[in-house]
Image: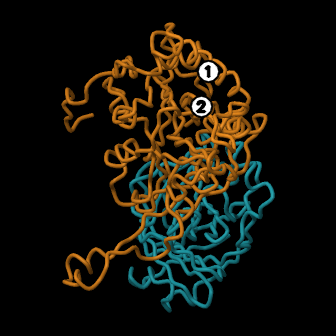
Chain colours: A cyan, B orange
């Protein structure tokens, strides 16, 4: 059970991946796997990566906190190549995301299902803005209007990324409350490996979380 | 929310199509500029040429696209290469500021910056063969709005649709995330990536014009009367007659498996000359094997029909096919799409 600690540090400090406020926060290392080719939604995407390695990043360190108003998720992983652009057609940015089930039984490896949606908060290295999407299965993501704040720092060949959103959703996305439980999944896209869409490294199982009381 | 692929499972009610007569194309590029001026002038679109005209034999646009995979083999998708901006022929940057605005115009020449080793029409007019029997012809290409589009099938977000009313294939830019699998999957490599907007973009068959009964700009602007535009299933129109009835208009690279809806009347070059400079009709100037490489075995029948009707017309007989291809009445080339765009009133509501 991963505990989302309650911290009283200011919003700006919590949004800074390098801030000292994050040092004492417990870190959980999650193993990542490449998404199986069989879960890709089209014959082309199943055929094209048949002989390629999916999921270049094999683990990510996760720290979480909330300040009573917003949740902050800090992700750190090793990545020797900094991929911040789409400067050519065959260039893709690094990315990361966290996934929450809106319906508790939502399957993580299928991005939910028609009746069991999931909510993802996403960061891409070529954008200063994060994105919130809900999905009802692979390939069905739709944006939701909430703001996902993101911040990223490069440090010793590592990415350090913060994704943050207000605890309350908008009705369609995940609702988080102090004292409540939920589950998270994490995904990382390695730009230099051409990873995008369903081609990513991800946690094959949910990790249970509990938000500390306010 | 179920995944929907409009038109992928069923067939559209009608199918728009074009026929290009390769015996008439002069490579003037009016079509490519018509499209460029109308659709690809915004940021991120600088290197895009949704309509292209290349010299054949030649490497095409993007360079060597015929070796980049994609399409289908026996219904199974082939992995494809993602063409880079350089392979398409990137938009060159020039030192305009220096020459025009910084007062150095009398000292510094206007010149391109950066890599200038390829452009979108770099091998123009090089062609093939040996003098005096060198040969080339021009090949105009647009998105083929295929009946079995590899792009639509590849997109993991179902962001590409085939319109039910006319079969026009469109990328929905609200759903597109710029994953670019469509660019890999298209065997004709007619899709571009817009780096500024982070979406993939391609020829839209001028659908806002087609919706009002106006032919696409590339077809209407052609001064050579090369391009027929209309509905494949309209028996009164020239497309149906040339493709289905006369069978002289055939698809490019049918082996790619996507059933393209742009058809070509294959070129018949002037005859060869022998060593003494006499006409030598023992074999064609454009090698038939090359035409078969481009158009498949159907090219033989198409050429036979063409030659037969040309001969009829030379003898003074009437040839419906020759009349169709000559197109003395320009508007007949567009049949149901012959409305004058000057009669349209564009408002801010679509």
Q: Quadrant of the N terminus of chain A?
A: bottom right
**B44 and A193: which is toward the camera:** B44
Q: Chain of mark 1?
A: B
* Dots 1, 2 in contact, CB < 8 A: yes
**Residue at 42% across / 85% down in the picture?**
A13
Q: Chain of mark 2?
A: B
Q: Which mark, by number, is residue B307?
A: 1
Position of B274 compared to A130: left or right? right
Q: Which mark, by number, is residue B268?
A: 2
Asked if residue A44 can be seen in this view, the reply is yes
In terms of sequence position, does the residue under pointer 1 or pointer 2 come before the other? 2
For mark 1, give the secondary structure.
helix
Q: Which mark, by number, is residue A4?
A: none
**Residue at 50% across / 92% down in the picture?**
A20
**B160 and A60: which is toward the camera:** B160
Q: Position of residue B206 (x, y in %)?
A: 38, 35
Query: Is B239 above or below relative to B199?
Result: above
């Amino acid at each position: 059970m991963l505990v989302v600690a309650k911290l009283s540090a200011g919003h700006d400090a919590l949004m800074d991946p390098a801030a000292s406020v994050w040092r004492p926060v417990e870190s959980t290392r999650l193993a990542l796997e490449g998404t199986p080719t069989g879960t890709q939604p089209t014959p082309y995407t199943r055929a094209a990566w048949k002989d390629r390695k999916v999921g270049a990043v094999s683990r990510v360190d996760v720290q979480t906190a909330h300040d009573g108003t917003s949740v902050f998720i800090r992700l750190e992983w090793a990545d020797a190549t900094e991929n911040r652009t789409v400067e050519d057609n065959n260039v893709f940015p690094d990315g990361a995301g966290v996934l929450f089930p809106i319906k508790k039984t939502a399957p993580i490896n299928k991005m939910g299902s028609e009746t069991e949606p999931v909510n993802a908060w996403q960061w891409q290295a070529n954008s200063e803005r994060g994105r919130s999407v809900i999905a009802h299965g692979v390939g069905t993501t739709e944006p939701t209007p909430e703001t996902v704040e993101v911040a990223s720092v490069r440090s010793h060949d590592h990415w350090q990324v913060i994704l943050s959103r207000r605890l309350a959703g908008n009705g369609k996305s995940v609702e988080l409350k102090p004292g409540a439980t939920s589950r998270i999944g994490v995904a990382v896209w390695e730009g230099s490996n051409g990873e995008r869409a369903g081609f990513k490294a991800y946690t094959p199982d949910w990790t249970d979380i509990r938000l500390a009381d306010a | 929310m179920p995944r929907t692929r409009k038109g992928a499972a069923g067939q559209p009610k009608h199918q728009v199509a074009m026929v290009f007569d390769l015996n008439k194309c002069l490579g003037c590029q009016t079509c490519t500029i018509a499209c460029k001026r109308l659709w690809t002038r915004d940021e991120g679109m600088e290197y895009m040429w949704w309509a292209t005209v290349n010299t054949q034999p030649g490497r095409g646009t993007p360079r060597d696209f015929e070796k980049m995979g994609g399409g289908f083999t026996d219904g199974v998708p082939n992995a494809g290469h993602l063409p880079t901006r350089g392979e398409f022929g990137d938009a060159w940057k020039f030192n305009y500021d220096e020459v025009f605005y910084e007062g150095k115009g009398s000292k510094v020449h206007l010149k391109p910056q950066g890599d200038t080793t390829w452009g979108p029409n770099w091998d123009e007019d090089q062609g093939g063969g040996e003098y005096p029997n060198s040969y080339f012809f021009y090949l105009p290409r647009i998105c083929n709005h295929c009946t079995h589009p590899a792009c639509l099938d590849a997109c993991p977000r179902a962001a590409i649709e085939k319109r039910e009313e006319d079969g026009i294939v469109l990328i929905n830019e609200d759903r597109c995330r710029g994953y670019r699998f469509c660019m890999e999957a298209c065997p004709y490599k007619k899709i571009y990536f817009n780096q500024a907007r982070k979406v993939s973009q391609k020829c839209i068959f001028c659908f806002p014009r087609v919706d009002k009964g106006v032919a696409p700009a590339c077809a209407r602007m052609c001064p050579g009367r090369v391009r027929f535009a209309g509905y494949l299933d309209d028996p009164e129109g020239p497309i149906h007659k040339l493709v289905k009835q006369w069978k002289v208009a055939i698809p490019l690279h049918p082996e790619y498996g996507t059933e393209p809806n742009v058809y070509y009347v294959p070129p018949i070059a002037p005859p060869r000359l022998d060593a003494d400079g006499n006409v030598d009709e023992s074999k064609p100037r454009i090698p038939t094997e090359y035409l078969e490489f481009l158009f498949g075995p159907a090219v033989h029948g198409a050429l036979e029909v063409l030659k037969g009707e040309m001969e009829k017309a030379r003898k003074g007989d009437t040839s419906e096919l020759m009349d169709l291809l000559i197109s003395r009445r320009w508007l007949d080339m567009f049949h149901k799409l012959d409305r004058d765009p000057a009669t349209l009133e564009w408002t801010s509501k679509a």
